[in-house]
Image (cartoon, rainbow, N blue to C red):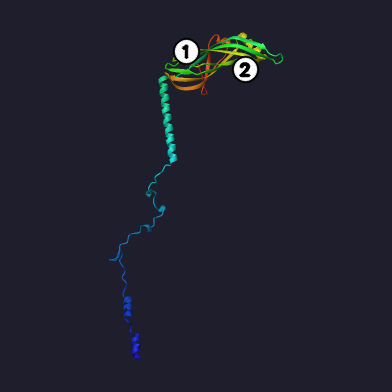
Amino acid sequence: MEKNRDHTTSPTGNEEMEAEKFLKPVLQKPPGYREPHAPLETPNTSSRRRPPKHMIPPSFYPPKKRRWSRCRLFCCSCCITVAIVLLLLVLTVSVFFLRYSPRLPVVRLASFRVTDFNFSRGKADDGLSQLTAKTTAKLDFRNPNGKLRYYYGDADVAVRVGDGDFETSLGSTKVNGFVEKPGNRTVVIVPINVKGQQVDDLTVKRLRAEMKSKKLVVKVTVKTKVGLAVGRRRIVTVGISLSCGGVTLQTLDKQMAKCTITMLKWYVHSIND
């Protein structure tokens, strides 16, 4: 009985070792201590947390590169090209004006002759008469430029007489174009005939009275194209409209009437020398 009691109460070897470990104090590793045979560990940069953006000053951010879109580049290229073309055009026109000093042609209504001016009675009840007239207008063209030529295209010429409500057409005709050399003067004779033009009785009386007293107002309009040329090379061609007269036959017997040139909706009055 005693042997058995002694065997059960005596501690074993393992229990003695555990008791010794428990009694020994555990030594703490100093900071920065590394086991001699431990493998080197690479730092994990991905695990580092970036500070929030509001904690970083704006000057620490790298500047962002601006990328231009194709549409913006195309628009800028077009604008630059148009600006260059306009600048060259302005320079060319300026040099041309400084060198040649172009001037508009001077056009006048030199004279107006009426060789036949008759009224024939129509039906008795309609109150209308038929006008038959033969007229001749002389247009005086002058080129004031010393180095530039004028090319005139075929022109449509129309004549009207009377004023206000009594204005009556005496017909129209076409005149062939011509070339006017620098400093040249050209007279164009325009014969115009009208036959069977219906006119009311009040207008007939008014036109007859004004014709006898030479107070009949004459108006001549011309529509044509004019080309400007240096030597034999044409530079530009524009359409113009000439409005001549607006004066009486009595005035035309004494002096020529000025013509108004309408070009590109600008009105330019010809002047006498």
Judge whether residue 87 can be spotted in this image.
Answer: yes
Neighbours of disc 1 within 10 Å: few (<14), some (14-19), many (20+): some
- Place of residue 33 in the rendered image (x, y in percent of width and height, measured from the top left): 29, 65
Q: Nearer the viewer, residue 230 or 164?
A: 230
- Disc 2 on helix, strand or loop? helix
Q: Residue at x 66, y 11 (%)?
A: 120
Residue 1 lies in what quarter of the image?
bottom left
Q: Nearer the viewer, residue 267 or 133?
A: 133
Q: Earlier in the sequence, mark 1 or mark 2?
A: 2
Residue 117: assigned label: none
Considering every residue shown, the one lying at the far right of the view is 125
* 207 on left or right of 82: right
- Place of residue 219 in the rendered image (x, y in percent of width and height, measured from the top left): 57, 15
* 254 on left or right of 59: right
- Disc 1 on helix, strand or loop? strand
Residue 164: assigned label: 2
Judge whether residue 159 can be spotted in this image.
Answer: no
Measured Cα–Cα span from mark 1 to mark 2: 34 Å
* 37 on left or right of 176: left
- Place of residue 133 in the rendered image (x, y in percent of width and height, measured from the top left): 61, 11
Q: Nearer the viewer, residue 101 or 53?
A: 101
Residue 87 lies in what quarter of the image?
top left
Considering every residue shown, the one lying at the far left of the view is 36
- Place of residue 263 in the rendered image (x, y in percent of width and height, measured from the top left): 51, 22
Q: Which residue, given by chain and number where applicable, does mark 1 sit on?
A: 185
Q: Residue at x 41, y 52 (%)?
A: 53
Amino acid at pointer 1: Arg
Front: mark 1 or 2:
1
The answer to whether the residues at label 1 and label 2 have Cβ atoms under 8 Å apart is no
Q: Is residue 63 above or below residue 104?
A: below
Amino acid at pointer 2: Gly
**Number of numbered labels in the structure image:** 2
